[in-house]
């Protein structure tokens, strides 16, 4: 299998910018350990504009920028940043938190500024199950209301759902809810023990395998596109069972097609892999992505450890680099969640 089409050495497909760590929620699985007030050293408005200009220097096809947090609505300059990104040709999505800030007016303003989609987190099919993870009563109702308002504003919606031992038995009902809400995309975030998420319970490899098989069987007509975060094994199964050339996102994983910029400007492979290869205040973000030892190492799946490096699907999949790091301290180690039956020797 040729790895050339599964590598992204010149530019990321998606850049996740953690615009702030300020957030009104206290989610039990928060990767960012979000807090109530902005960090005093987060990137300024001028630095944010400069970052967007620098991202545009990757050239075409330009990366898509996801404004995340914390809660990006906590930034007073968010709309200015979105407008600037769109003026210079960058695609933009926003991942707001379901707080009172996210009202009908805010959604309309995001749409008018040029946001092409928003994502909302839905970790339970009922108010009680969702609130048990989000930590704030009323968050479920606000999420549902925001989803309805986004649809009315014709702003495409992605629903994000955590996959952990706490949510495993609720995934079917959550999927039904995403269909009712008219979500364009359902992204399942498979737990990585980072931030407050280290306190939650991981699913087993056997459960992981069964979820992937279930996702493959979900009907696609009339429902959302199914995507995964920190579970590239789904694309490996799609590749194995169909036309590999049509597998969306083949090879994309932390550091390979993905880049993360923290609220203070640190440049890393993803928000779930807490390693820094530089900082936008002192380093050129394009050069860091293309030439830093960390990013280049993450783009060499032949050198991955254990079953990940020996699997013939290491190019299209490669396993979760964040989970490997959380388990062993080596971002190029074996993904411990991958079940043995998915291993295919080269």
Image (cartoon, helix red, strand yellow):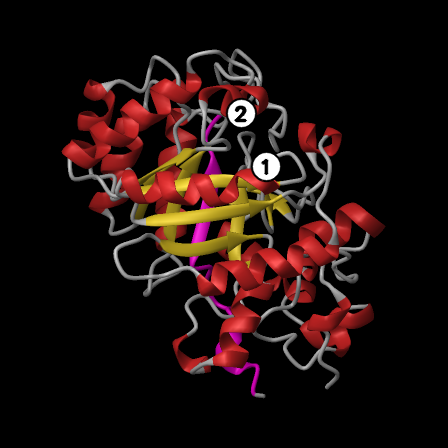
Question: Is 313 situated left or right of 328 in this image?
Answer: left
Question: Is 194 situated left or right of 144 in this image?
Answer: right
Residue bearing mark 1: 167
Say if residue 317 shows up in the picture.
Answer: yes
Asked if residue 165 is among those painted magenta in the image, a careful observer would answer no
The residue at 57%/60% (across/down) is 212
Asked if residue 7 is among those painted magenta in the image, a careful observer would answer yes
Residue bearing mark 2: 129
Camera-side residue of 35 and 146: 146
The residue at 49%/18% (across/down) is 23
Asked if the residue at tag 1 contacts the one at tag 2, i.e. Cβ–Cβ closer than 8 Å, the answer is yes
User: In the image, is residue 43 above or below residue 116?
Assistant: above
Q: Position of residue 275 (x, y in %)?
A: 69, 45
User: In the image, is residue 117 above or below residue 220?
Assistant: above
Q: Position of residue 248 (x, y in %)?
A: 41, 68
Looking at the rendering, the stretch of residues picked out in magenta corresponds to: 2-20
Quarter of the image where the N terminus is located: bottom right
Q: Earlier in the sequence, mark 2 or mark 1?
A: 2
Is the residue marked by circle 1 packed among few (<14), some (14-19), or many (20+) residues within 10 Å? some
Dividing the picture into quadrants, the one containing residue 266 is top right
Camera-side residue of 170 and 121: 170
């Amino acid at each position: 299998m040729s790895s050339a089409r599964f590598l992204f050495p010149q530019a990321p497909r998606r850049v996740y910018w953690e615009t702030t760590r300020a957030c009104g929620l206290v989610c039990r699985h928060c990767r960012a350990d979000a807090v109530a007030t902005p960090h005093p050293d987060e990137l300024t408005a001028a630095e944010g504009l400069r970052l967007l200009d620098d991202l545009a220097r990757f050239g075409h096809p330009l990366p898509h920028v996801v404004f995340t947090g914390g809660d990006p609505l906590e930034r007073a300059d968010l709309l200015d940043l979105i407008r600037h990104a769109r003026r210079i040709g960058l695609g933009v999505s926003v991942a707001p938190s379901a707080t009172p800030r996210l009202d009908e007016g805010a959604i309309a303003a995001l749409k008018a500024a040029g946001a092409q989609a928003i994502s909302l987190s839905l970790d339970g099919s009922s108010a009680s199950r969702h609130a048990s993870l989000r930590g704030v009563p009323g968050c479920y109702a606000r999420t549902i209301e925001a989803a309805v308002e986004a649809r009315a504003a014709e702003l495409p919606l992605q629903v994000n759902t955590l996959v952990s031992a706490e949510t495993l038995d609720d995934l079917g009902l959550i999927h039904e809810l995403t269909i009712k809400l008219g979500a364009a995309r359902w992204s399942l975030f498979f737990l990585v023990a980072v931030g407050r998420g280290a306190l939650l319970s991981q699913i087993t490899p056997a459960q992981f395998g069964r979820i992937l098989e279930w996702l493959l069987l979900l009907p696609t007509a009339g429902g959302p596109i199914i995507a995964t975060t920190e579970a590239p094994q789904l694309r490996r199964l799609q590749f194995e069972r169909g036309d590999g050339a049509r597998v969306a996102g083949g090879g994309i994983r932390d550091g390979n097609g993905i880049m993360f910029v923290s609220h203070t400007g640190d440049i890393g492979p993803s928000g779930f892999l807490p390693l820094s290869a530089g900082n936008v205040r002192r380093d050129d973000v394009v050069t860091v992505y293309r030439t830093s030892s960390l990013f280049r190492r993450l783009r060499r799946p032949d050198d991955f450890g254990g079953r990940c490096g020996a699997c013939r699907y290491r190019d299209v999949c490669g396993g979760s680099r964040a989970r490997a790091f959380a388990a062993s301290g080596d971002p190029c180690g074996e993904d411990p969640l991958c079940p043995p039956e998915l291993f295919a020797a080269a």
